[in-house]
Image: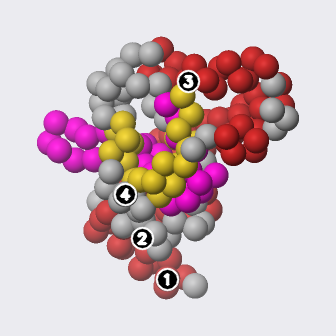
Amino acid sequence: MNSFEEFFKEQPIRQVSKGEVLVRPGQNSSESFYVVKGCLRSYITDVKGKDHIYQFAPEDWIISDLEFVKNKSGATLSIDAIEDSEVKEIPRDKMYSILDNDPSILQALIQKFQNRVYTLQNRVLQLLSYTAEERYISFMNTYPNLYHRVPLKMVASYLGVTPESLSRVRKELLKTK
């Protein structure tokens, strides 16, 4: 195997229906998911039943619960499909055996995970110090193709605001255009 793309070509595509759950909290599984088409999300649900979105994963993103991938313990996050999607499952053990034998795949995979970590780090910093408007603008820059694909209540959850606050932010931004 010569490249990262070849690694993914060998993995079968799994069709995932909108709303289908791939990972549940407490589940012992070790797959990461490479999104070929569609969009997945990872999230937690609080004791009141409210979802808090951790990450979106559109095409060419990798999504996983690092707790169970790294430590082989029960998942912390849920992962489901926001829309009908095609994913390639990346079993932890297979990934490590291939990575040990092909440094080019390792380098490409590290780059994808670094991009993910960078996005998540920025998101945490923004939640700590940005206004809702600044977080929304950052969301639009990070996920430019998701605006019309993701329900606004999910965008609000990701931004840490209510849907009503998001609506106000969007109206204000339209006024400044």
37 in the magenta segment: yes
Residue picked out by circle 2:
169
Which label's residue is closer to the chain start, 4 or 3? Answer: 4
Which label's residue is closer to the chain start, 4 or 2? Answer: 4
Gap between marks 4 and 3 measured at Cα: 23 Å
Tell me the kind of residue under disc 4. Ser
Which label's residue is closer to the chain start, 2 or 1? Answer: 2
**Crowd around label 1: few <14 · some 14–19 · many ≥20 (10 Å):** few
Q: Is residue 26 above or below residue 165?
A: above
Give the extent of the magenta segment: 31-60
**Crowd around label 4: few <14 · some 14–19 · many ≥20 (10 Å):** some
Residue picked out by circle 1:
174
**Residue drawn 17% across the image and 44% down it:** 49
Give the image quarter of residue 91.
top right
Tell me the kind of residue under disc 2. Val
Tell me the kind of residue under disc 1. Leu
